[in-house]
């Protein structure tokens, strides 16, 4: 099984609080994306809403995936003042959140 | 906000049942990866274990990310006999699971 050297994905699943206005959600997504330009170790950002049909999403409605070059880069990101300021506002708007980091690995079959 | 045309990510978070032997987990991961060669709309597969430090992973220990060209491709995958057979064995080994599909979208900032 081959690990992509150094690449670490930071995946956040979110359910916004009921009644959060769509324009507030869009503002938060733009704020999240803007962190790429503010925090050097954060290399990319993608997001999307749940389109699954298996009904195993446990109420989560949004996925946010960002990419870092190392676990240390994620630690630097977490401690960065721009992230701390954003996270305080973002997490306050969420009903549920899961954050998991992993090093994407392929399997030779 | 720009959506990657047609690309859909299928993300599964898992916690294996306590006591599942490591070689059983490895066998299941190889079985999951092998679906890429059996089910045409499944285009890629990566996995990894949680390396997060924020303690927001809610007990999930593994991430499995596969890529499809469309939502219809995921539906075809879900219904494919090779997936059904694998999923029955795989899900039986899990204590917790979340599955969410999304179209990765970038934000112009």
Image: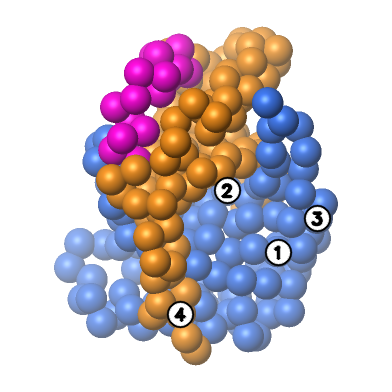
Chain colours: A blue, B orange
- Look at the image and tell me whether residue B84 can be seen: no
Secondary element type, mark 2:
strand
Q: Can marks 3 and 4 be said to lie on one chain?
A: no
- Which numbered mark, 2 or 1, is in the foreground of this view? 1
* Residue drawn at the location 31% of the way across and 49% of the way down: B71
State how many labels appear: 4
Secondary element type, mark 4:
loop
- Which numbered mark, 2 or 3, is in the foreground of this view? 3
Q: Which residue is mark 3?
A: A6
- Image position of B61 with respect to B29: above or below: below
Q: Residues within 10 Å of mark 1 (few under 14, many from 20)?
A: many
* Residue drawn at the location 40% of the way across and 14% of the way down: B85
Q: Residues within 10 Å of mark 2 (few under 14, many from 20)?
A: many
Inter-mark Cα distance, 2 to 1: 13 Å
Inter-mark Cα distance, 1 to 3: 8 Å
Does the residue at mark 2 contact the one at mark 4 (Cβ under 8 Å)? no
Inter-mark Cα distance, 2 to 3: 16 Å
Tell me which segment is drawn in magenta: B74-91
Inter-mark Cα distance, 1 to 4: 17 Å
Chain under callout 1: A
Which of the numbered marks, if any, corresponds to residue B45?
Answer: none
Q: Which residue is mark 2?
A: A100
Q: Can marks 2 and 1 be said to lie on one chain?
A: yes
Q: Which residue is mark 1?
A: A68
């Amino acid at each position: 099984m081959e690990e992509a050297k150094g690449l670490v994905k930071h995946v956040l699943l979110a359910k916004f609080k009921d009644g959060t206005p769509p324009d507030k959600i869009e503002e938060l997504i733009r704020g999240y994306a803007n962190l790429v330009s503010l925090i050097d170790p954060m290399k990319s950002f993608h997001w999307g809403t749940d389109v699954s049909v298996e009904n195993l999403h446990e109420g989560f409605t949004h996925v946010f995936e960002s990419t870092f070059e190392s676990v240390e880069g994620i630690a630097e990101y977490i401690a960065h003042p721009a992230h701390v300021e954003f996270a305080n506002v973002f997490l306050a708007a969420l009903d549920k959140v899961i954050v998991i980091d992993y090093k994407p690995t392929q399997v030779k079959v």
